[in-house]
Amino acid sequence: MTVSLLNNGASANAPATGGSITGNSASATSDMFTKLLVAQIKNQDPLSPSDPAQFVQQLTQLSQTESLQNLSSLTSANASVLQSMQVLALGAQVGSDVMAETGTLTTDGSTKVHAQTTLSATSSSTRVVLTGIDGAKHNVNLGVAAAGTVPFTIDPTALGLPAGTYTMTVETSTKENPPVDLQGRLNSVRLSSAGSVVLNIGNIGEVAPTAITAFNGKSTASATQSSL
């Protein structure tokens, strides 16, 4: 009689986990597998013993399971360390002007905002369209724009933009939809409840670190920007 690792006497030694076997640590899993293997040996038929190769295979599976658990623990630890290093590095940049890719602008209604877009081809008619929550559109006309980086400035006073948040799109004669990078002051760096890094940038709001496209250093102007 060959006893399965998951049957008969072995099951009495297995922890009750609602149908799944999950160890809290590599040592707990190792102990569980050892008990199951001993139970299987005790319950085998002496007249028809199990093939020794079967035990070797099971021991190999145990070793592989432990290795995978150790690798998983090491990967989690490394990810935590890297995340902490990222927070420290970004924290040192608080107060600096940064460029971040975004589709929205948050304005106080008076402060000028520097921005840029990048075109893959020359556009004979180019404009940035800002749309408020009321649906009203405000255009920043860029005219003819060559391929490459196209800097521009958003002046809320000249455009008649009340304080608030606006969505941004770039319309070109080539029908491409290039991204927009806004300049703002890096106000804070924090970890969210989910464990991800979140940056708060003036004129933009909260974004992920991947949104940052440039660090421009600290300036007198950045120190006067409010946290939006």
Image: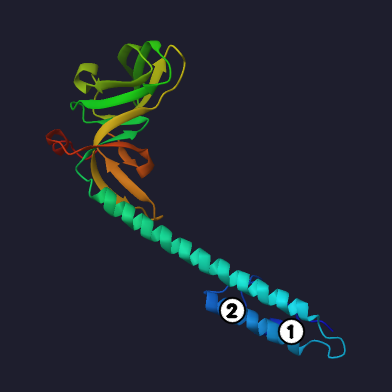
Q: Could you tell me which residue is drawn at 54 percent across and 75 percent down?
A: 26
Asked whether residue 15 is in view, the answer is no
For label 2, the residue is: 30
For the residue marked with disc 1, what is the amino acid?
Gln
Which residue is disc 1 drawn over? 40
Which quadrant of the figure contains the C terminus? top left
Residue 132 as seen in the image, left or right of residue 31? left
Residue at horizontal 22 percent and vertical 49 percent from the top? 92
Q: Tag 1: Cα neighbours inside 10 Å, few (<14), some, or many (≥20)?
A: many
Neighbour tally class for label 2: few under 14, some 14-19, many 20 plus, Cα within 10 Å = some
Amino acid at the residue labelled 2: Ser
User: Which callout, 1 or 2, points at the residue further toward the start of the chain?
Assistant: 2
Secondary structure under tag 1 reads: helix
Q: Is residue 122 above or below residue 180?
A: above
Position in image of residue 217 (x %, y %): 20, 38
Q: Is residue 129 visible?
A: yes
- Front residue of 197/227: it is 197
Left or right side of 122 for 73: right
On screen, residue 36 above or below 202: below
Image quarter of the N terminus:
bottom right
Label 2, secondary structure: give it. helix
Q: Is residue 96 left or right of residue 139?
A: left
Q: Mark 2 and mark 1 in contact (Cβ < 8 Å)?
A: no
Task: Tell me where residue 197 appears, x and y as whole percent.
Answer: 35, 50
Disc number placed over residue 110 in the picture, else none = none
Residue 133: quadrant of the picture: top left
Where is residue 174? Give x, y as percent: 46, 13
Residue 50 sits above or below residue 69 on the image: below
Q: Nearer the viewer, residue 171 or 97?
A: 97
Viewer-proximal residue among 199 and 205? 199
Q: Quadrant of residue 145?
A: top left
> Going 40% across and 12% down the picture, which residue do you hit?
123
